Image (cartoon, rainbow, N blue to C red):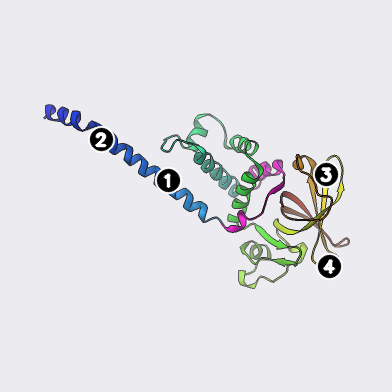
Amino acid sequence: MAVFDALWLQVWWPWLLVWFAEACLVVAAVAIGLRHWRRARVPATSTGHGVSFYLDEDFVLRLYRQFGGKYRAALTQEVEERISEGDETAVSAEVAPVKIGRKGSNSSEVFRRYVEDNDAITVIGMIIDVLDGADDIIYVDLRKRDVVSNRALAKTLDIEDEAAPAWVRPRELGSFVSLRGRFRLVDKDADTATFQAPLGESADEVLVRCAVVGLSGVTVPSAEFPARCLGQVQEWNSDSRTLTVHPIAIFR
């Protein structure tokens, strides 16, 4: 029997290698297909914002480190998937989580390096995906004074989705908002650039204060320009009728 086994292996081992390689290719194809399927399920709102005009990288890092386990876990998974997708090796046992652990680096350091090494539109697209997945972004059209009735709005107002009103008072907006409107520069010094956008035809307005460092390499328009701002609501001043928003990113 041993002789038979040796002869069998001598004849068939090249074909065994071919079959093994084919099996690996099938596994890789399935993995790639699953990744593309997951990407196809991402809501359209996460990719239709335009060209990145401003990004607060420090806030992105704070969002990861301080704003709750749901963001940290989701962002870590996004980074691991994107690092894995960028690996040219089709089949490897060294997937991203294993690499991170074996190198002795913590996930926070890996995330920071990912933010620093990648362009703004790639990183902020990932942030939008995660915030959207957590139902934490309220979408507002400032020009029409219109708000999208989604789960984030219903959660903020503590109501059922179908009962969401067509317009919400500025002071009722949730933590994270995506504001589409026409912005103009109203003040700028060495550290801060402040943009203002009206809320429809009313006297209400939105103020967005950007760190100048986040505008590095960007020509700030001198006239009014259309943009979308993803930010965190700071406060509503009823006397000046002004909603102050801390911008995470601005797109044109």
Tell me whether the residue at label 3 lies in contact with that at label 2, contact meaning CB atoms closer than 8 angstroms.
Answer: no
Of callouts 1 and 3, the N-terminal one: 1
Residue drawn at point x = 70 percent, y = 57 percent: 177
Q: Is residue 8 magenta?
A: no
What range of the chain is rendered magenta? 43-68
In what quadrant of the picture does the N terminus appear?
Answer: top left
- The residue under label 4 is which amino acid type? Ser
Pinpoint residue 174: horizontal percent, then vertical percent.
Answer: 70, 59
Of callouts 3 and 4, the N-terminal one: 3
Tell me whether the residue at label 1 lies in contact with that at label 4, contact meaning CB atoms closer than 8 angstroms.
Answer: no
Q: Which mark is residue 31?
A: 1
- The residue under label 2 is which amino acid type? Leu
Q: Does the magenta stretch include residue 54?
A: yes
Distance CA(mark 3)–CA(mark 2)? 65 Å
Distance CA(mark 1)–CA(mark 2)? 23 Å
Q: Nearer the viewer, mark 3 or mark 2?
A: 2
Relative to 53, say whether 226 is above or below: below
Pinpoint residue 111: horizontal percent, then vertical percent.
Answer: 60, 38
Of callouts 2 and 4, the N-terminal one: 2
Q: In which quadrant of the rendered view does residue 135 lie?
A: bottom right
Of callouts 1 and 4, the N-terminal one: 1
Residue on which the image places disc 2: 16
Q: Badge 2: how crowded within 10 Å, few (<14), some, or many (20+)? A: few
**Element type at marker 3?**
strand
Residue on which the image places disc 4: 202
**Element type at marker 2?**
helix
Q: In this view, does 157 lie to the left or right of 21?
A: right
Of callouts 3 and 2, the N-terminal one: 2
